[in-house]
Image (cartoon, helix red, strand yellow):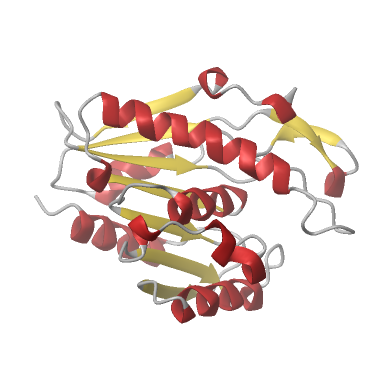
């Protein structure tokens, strides 16, 4: 069952920009998508650093907001109980933490590992990145929000207070209103996190200008 998520059970798609990578990006897809969703972006990012991209597949679970339909999801979404997915989020965080630890065991220092996520995946990326016990290269949060931002201080670790955070959102996003992302941004800034904010004339998606900014940001945290 998804509630007892086994980290080793996550399937992952891996792509490397060059042999013998010296950095890793773990990139989480959104609700109903899968590991292939952002894989085509890798060559478009045109990075000079040798980076391994890891795209995990979320488990298949019933999703309340979609009438209980089963699909890949990092957590359940119940519009009547916005914080009800907390246990699922914690389980997903633990699963992705295991992937980070595997990369570290393979020789990639934590300071060369970035977390990225779109929508649901961004929620998990933020949750793990802010609570991880060792410094990370960066956190990329696309079209997403900070879960339970009013209680976030209870879940923070000091290791990543200086870690750069890239946040991007569409001003016409009908799925996650930009106001929710702005509230999350302000909560992070008030806690002295380094947030680079971008907004675009788009909905719940990724646009070409955003891909350019992602490339620039990744190049800044992974100088060759």
What is the residue that sits farthest to the top in this orientation? 9
Q: Residue at x 35, y 72 (%)?
A: 194
Name the side, left or right, on which 147 lies relative to 108.
right
Is residue 209 positioned above or below 90 on the image?
below
Is residue 80 positioned above or below 23 on the image?
below
Residue 144 appears in the picture as rendered: no
Name the side, left or right, on which 2 lies relative to 149.
right
Report x, y in % for residue 170: 56, 70
Report x, y in % for residue 171: 58, 76
Task: Identify the image quadrant of residue 140.
Answer: bottom left
In this view, the residue in front, 109 or 219, is: 109
Name the side, left or right, on which 173 lies relative to 197.
right
Q: Quadrant of the N terminus?
A: top right
The count of marks equals 0
Is residue 131 positioned above or below 188 on the image?
above
Report x, y in % for residue 139: 39, 56
Report x, y in % for residue 125: 49, 50
Q: Residue at x 46, y 56 (%)?
A: 130
Is residue 107 positioned above or below 32 on the image?
above
Residue 184 appears in the picture as rendered: yes
In this view, the residue in front, 46 or 86, is: 86
Q: Residue at x 90, y 59 (%)?
A: 80
């Amino acid at each position: 069952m998804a509630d007892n998520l086994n980290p080793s059970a996550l399937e992952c798609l891996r792509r490397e920009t060059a042999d013998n990578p010296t950095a890793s990006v773990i990139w989480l897809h959104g609700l109903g998508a899968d590991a292939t969703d952002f894989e085509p972006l890798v060559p478009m990012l045109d990075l000079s650093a040798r980076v391994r991209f890891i795209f995990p597949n979320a488990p298949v679970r019933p999703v309340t907001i979609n009438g209980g339909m089963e699909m890949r999801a990092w957590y359940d979404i119940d519009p009547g109980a916005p914080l009800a997915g907390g246990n699922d989020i914690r389980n997903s965080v633990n699963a992705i933490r295991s992937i980070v630890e595997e990369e570290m065991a393979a020789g990639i220092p934590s300071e060369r590992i970035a977390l990225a996520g779109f929508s649901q995946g961004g929620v998990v990326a933020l949750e793990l990145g802010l609570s991880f016990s060792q410094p990370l290269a960066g956190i990329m949060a696309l079209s997403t929000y900070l879960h339970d931002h009013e209680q976030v201080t209870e879940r923070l670790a000091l290791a990543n207070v200086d870690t750069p955070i890239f946040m991007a959102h569409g001003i016409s996003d009908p799925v996650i209103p930009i106001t929710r992302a702005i509230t999350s941004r302000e909560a992070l800034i008030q806690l002295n996190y380094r947030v680079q904010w971008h907004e675009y004339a788009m909905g719940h998606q990724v646009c070409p200008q955003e891909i350019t900014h992602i490339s620039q940001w990744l190049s800044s945290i992974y100088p060759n």
